[in-house]
Image (spheres, rainbow, N blue to C red):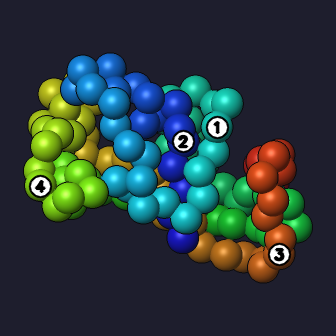
């Protein structure tokens, strides 16, 4: 599954000078109230969220699909912005389910 911080997306807003719709990234789990790019710090760790446990395995290297808006037209140069301002093309992280469970809005994330 994929995890992405909303503050990371907000930082991309600043980078491209336009509002970036978080749906472009098609994440399975959105996290908020954490610093931008904080999700990268979880790589190699197991997270407890609700009654589930997820192991963060790798950053997500993005492709040109994130540059297209809902109409399918490329309208934001997000890959160039990632390269220019952050020196990578990663946004969010992949995680594998270690223990299935229920995750609800507002659940705390605990590094196990």
Query: How far is the residue under mark 2 from the one under mark 4?
Result: 25 Å
Q: How much space separates mark 4 and mark 1, taking CA atoms?
A: 28 Å
Of mark 2 and mark 4, the one earlier in the sequence is 2
Q: CA distance from mark 3 to mark 1?
A: 20 Å
Q: Nearer the viewer, residue 77 or 75?
A: 75
**Marks 3, 4: nearer the viewer:** 4
Tag 1 residue: 32
- Name the N-terminal-most of marks 3 and 1: 1
Q: CA distance from mark 3 to mark 2?
A: 21 Å
Which quarter shows the N terminus? bottom right
Q: Position of residue 99 (x, y in %)?
A: 78, 77
- Residue beneath the point at 42% across and 53% down: 23
Q: Residue at x 81, y 46 (%)?
A: 106
Q: Position of residue 52 (x, y in %)?
A: 80, 69
Residue to which mark 2 is pinned = 5
Query: Does the residue at mark 1 contact the one at mark 2 (Cβ under 8 Å)?
Result: yes
Tell me the residue that label 4 is attached to: 73
Secondary structure beneath dot 2 equals strand
Instruction: Give the vertical position of 10 relative to 57 (above or below).
Output: above
Earlier sequence position, callout 3 versus callout 4: 4
76 lies left or right of 107: left
Q: Residues within 10 Å of mark 1 (few under 14, many from 20)?
A: few
Q: Is residue 110 visible?
A: no
At a point 17% along the width and 61% down the height, the residue shown is 72
């Amino acid at each position: 599954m994929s995890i992405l911080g909303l503050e990371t997306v907000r930082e991309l807003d600043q980078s491209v000078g336009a509002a970036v719709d978080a749906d472009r990234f098609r994440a399975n789990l959105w996290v908020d109230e954490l610093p931008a790019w904080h999700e990268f710090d979880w790589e190699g760790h197991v997270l407890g969220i609700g009654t589930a446990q997820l192991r963060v395995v790798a950053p997500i290297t993005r492709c040109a699909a994130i540059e297209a808006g809902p109409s399918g037209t490329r309208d934001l140069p997000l890959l160039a912005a990632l390269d220019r301002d952050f020196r990578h093309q990663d946004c969010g992280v992949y995680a594998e389910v270690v223990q299935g469970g229920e995750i609800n809005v507002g659940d705390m994330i605990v590094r196990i």
